[in-house]
Image (cartoon, rainbow, N blue to C red):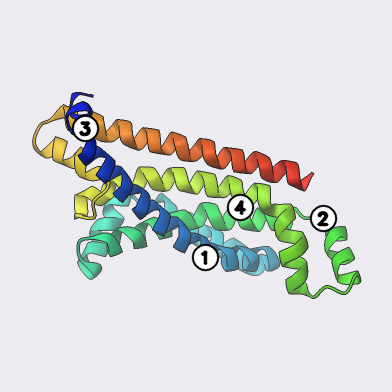
Amino acid sequence: MAYLLRHPGEVALRTLQHLEIVAIAIGIALALALPLGVLAARSARVRGPLLVLLNAIYTLPSLAVLAFLVTYFGLGLVTTEIALVAYAQMVLVRNISVGLLGVPAAMREAALGLGMTPLQSLLRVEFPQALPVIVAGLRLATVATISIATLAGKIDAGGLGALLFAGLDNDDPNRIVAGSLAAATLAIGADLALRGCERLAVSRTR
């Protein structure tokens, strides 16, 4: 806490860096997960192997993944983003596919009966109905990404992890506490905000 009070500017800067890292990762991950989730929902043959592969990636130790990626992409933001996007896929793709599979077949048939194309049915009927489950997955993926992103400090990508690892390297527990508190606050804030969005999505679906 002492370091936080003495260096609020640095902690604020690292927090903004952390937010940027997470926002980029979640944005890219969601853009990739949406088509993959739709594909998984549409094809059982694809869904099984795809989820097994993404689950296997998710279980890999994050430090080992970063060390492997550094070999090919070097230190910095690019390596961090690749790792974070890969880790977020399992939760996002699973929830998107589960949400779409939970839409009653009668609703899809009614949409097609009204003259909608499959794409229109997906965008206007299925996605709105699946939104609560999708937002729940987004919430989990975001909180996990905030946590994993602290490792970015180990490979010179900035963020709150820079405080944590600087504290470890210099035997400075105050820095570690400051970085940990900021990361925890960020995760709790993101969780509460997205939980509110989740409740809103549920109420609109009903």
Dot 2 corresponds to which residue? 104
Front label number (1 vs 4): 1
What is the crowding at mark 1: few (fewer than 14 residues within 10 Å), some, or many (at least 20)? few
Under mark 4, the amino acid is Asn
Estimate the spatial distance between the alpha carbons at disc 1 and disc 4, rounded to whole Å.
14 Å
Estimate the spatial distance between the alpha carbons at disc 4 and disc 3, rounded to whole Å.
34 Å
The quadrant of the image that shows the N terminus is top left
**Which residue does the image show at 23% across and 70% down from the upper left?**
72
114 left or right, relative to 143: right
Dot 1 corresponds to which residue? 31
User: Is 7 above or below relative to 117?
Assistant: above
Under mark 3, the amino acid is Ile
Front label number (3 vs 2): 3
User: Is 166 above or below relative to 111?
Assistant: above
Q: Earlier in the sequence, mark 3 or mark 2?
A: 2
Front label number (2 vs 1): 1
- 1 and 3 marks in contact (CB < 8 Å): no
Dot 4 corresponds to which residue? 95
| Disc ID at residue 58 | none
183 and 102: which one is in front? 183
Under mark 2, the amino acid is Pro
**Which residue does the image show at 58% across and 64% down from the upper left?**
34
The quadrant of the image that shows the C terminus is top right
Dot 3 corresponds to which residue? 176
Under mark 1, the amino acid is Ala
